[in-house]
Image (cartoon, coloured by chain):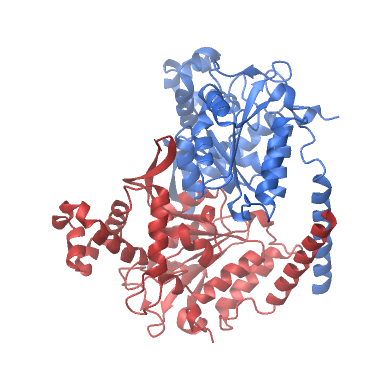
Chain colours: A blue, B red
Amino acid sequence: MKHTIFKTFCLAAVVFFCAASVCAADPLPSWNDGAAKQSIVSFVTKVTQPDSPDFVPVPERIAVFDNDGTLWAEQPMYFQAFFTFDRVKALAPQHPEWKDKEPFASVLKGDIKSALAGGEHALLEMVMATHAGMTTVEFEQIVTDWIATATHPKTGKRYTEMVYQPMLELLEYLRENGFKTFIVSGGGIEFMRPWAERVYGIPPEQVIGSSIKTKFELFDGKPELVRLPEINFIDDKEGKPVAINQHIGRRPIAAFGNSDGDLQMLQYTVAGSGASFCLYVHHTDAEREWAYDRQSHIGRLDKGLDEAGAKGWTVVDMKNDWKIIYPFEKK
Amino acid sequence: MKHTIFKTFCLAAVVFFCAASVCAADPLPSWNDGAAKQSIVSFVTKVTQPDSPDFVPVPERIAVFDNDGTLWAEQPMYFQAFFTFDRVKALAPQHPEWKDKEPFASVLKGDIKSALAGGEHALLEMVMATHAGMTTVEFEQIVTDWIATATHPKTGKRYTEMVYQPMLELLEYLRENGFKTFIVSGGGIEFMRPWAERVYGIPPEQVIGSSIKTKFELFDGKPELVRLPEINFIDDKEGKPVAINQHIGRRPIAAFGNSDGDLQMLQYTVAGSGASFCLYVHHTDAEREWAYDRQSHIGRLDKGLDEAGAKGWTVVDMKNDWKIIYPFEKK
């Protein structure tokens, strides 16, 4: 019996390594050949070859990814905002005061533009406020139900179908090369965790995000964590390196973002003592996705674009560097 | 070339699985045969056998361990307290006000008993205060230097030699069976991370603890995280399940502690929907280690001992269940 299990293990190992070996032929099939793709492959090669002067041991191969606009789309507004507005509508009967309180009032009137006028911080506060008052288990179920059914107003696709195929390949390529992949997002940590493992292959313990406080309570002797309407941490800009240190405890060697909100994370990554890699996804494809950068209210990329140019970071031109954007475009 | 690498991989896989197979003969050699050891093996067997009704998929095999008194000793006081007192002495010239401020004043007079009179929370505050004012990189170096040289007043051993050999075997046994092992300690997260990987095989991203706040700053364009003299989180009692949810994002299926400070973590673990395992290390060996429980100021085990009895949790009798305590006792 033990011998059979052992043989099965070895067979599984063979299949696994063969599969990895075949993939290595073109690990990034949805990337056009060009400087961006080449820079990724060069970096991975130099940090993984044992005889390379830039070799990095496996435990130190930490890669961090922003989510909104880096792993999935973020237009015409953050997908969590759609979720939040749906939650505002669902919870409105329990919150009569929202009728006269912005930005809730605008949401209930269907005036999304006014609701978003308060900017990202106001949005995050509204996100946190509408996500409290239940246990963590209940909230996970609410997110799971919503993400399985809600669809994007422009594409008609589920939000988890609007992830970037080239980035899925990049995540897998890095993991096959011994990297541990983390999400470090301004989005809600418990909004991402219920589906990040299925969609990105990133387990909950490698998802870092903004959060509200929770409280341990016993209900009839059964322990639960209750979500409180109080912001715990905003994982954006200067907050990203702070959260990386808190959750991971070592400096990443590779960082991927798309906006000025990711700049400090990239700066922190590149300041390490060994080889490092920074990449910005630049939204240049108005036809297949959206085109926006310096003037955008969502995912503004201005200072970051300048710094990427000055420091020689990789900037992905989505229109020219990516063969397809979404997995559903695959033939 | 590629084929050679492939063969090497397969060979490594064979060696790995063979080693695991041999270990399975007695995965816990420093544990005496008895109810405690049997309960561990029974649990691991039932959650890892694919045809078991209690089977748990690998990604959900989360095991959480307290540190002080569970993985290493904690008498006559927390080892981080020794570090803290050494830091108080080293930093005293920069803090003339400490001469008249408790508990610092007592430390500087060498009166440890008075310094500790304020209890655990006062100690933690002093810990945090003496650990601030430098970058995270500088602090890591301070801890690394101290842990390499400081010795315990009773045994004369380095603190990292005073880890429990049976628990090291347990950590490895769980990992060989697909568990991810985490530390969830009231101790400082950045005090444990510099040595936890080497000593316990637990990487920094799986170490959770109490923390002070940090701030992202640029010094001549170089980003650093500066440690602030402000408590961020106390990872004790009700805080442990909160931190587990924040860092791991899923409920553990196995939890290991030694004091009432771990009780909520064990309660939270056992409240999951599937099979779960809780274990208390009971300090019963006054000769080889220390004997203490209900009346101790450090690592008090009172309510937890009652609940363990009522709920049938495993309680390790260190004197009778463990063949040796520390690795240096190995023949």
Residue at 77% x, 61% y: name it. Answer: B9
Percent across and percent down for residue A137 are 56, 44
Q: Is residue A305 left or right of residue A95?
A: right
Q: Is residue B131 left or right of residue A57?
A: left
Percent across and percent down for residue B194 are 46, 59
Percent across and percent down for residue A174 are 69, 45
Residue at 29% x, 54% y: name it. Answer: B130
* Residue B65 in sight: no
Quadrant assignment for the N terminus of chain B: bottom right
Picture layout, residue B300 above or below residue A137 = below
Q: In which quarter of the image is residue A184?
A: top right
Q: Quadrant of residue B86?
A: bottom left
* Residue B18 in sight: yes
Percent across and percent down for residue A160 are 69, 32
Quadrant assignment for the C terminus of chain B: bottom right
Nearer to us in this view, B222 or B217 = B222
Picture layout, residue B83 above or below residue A124 = below
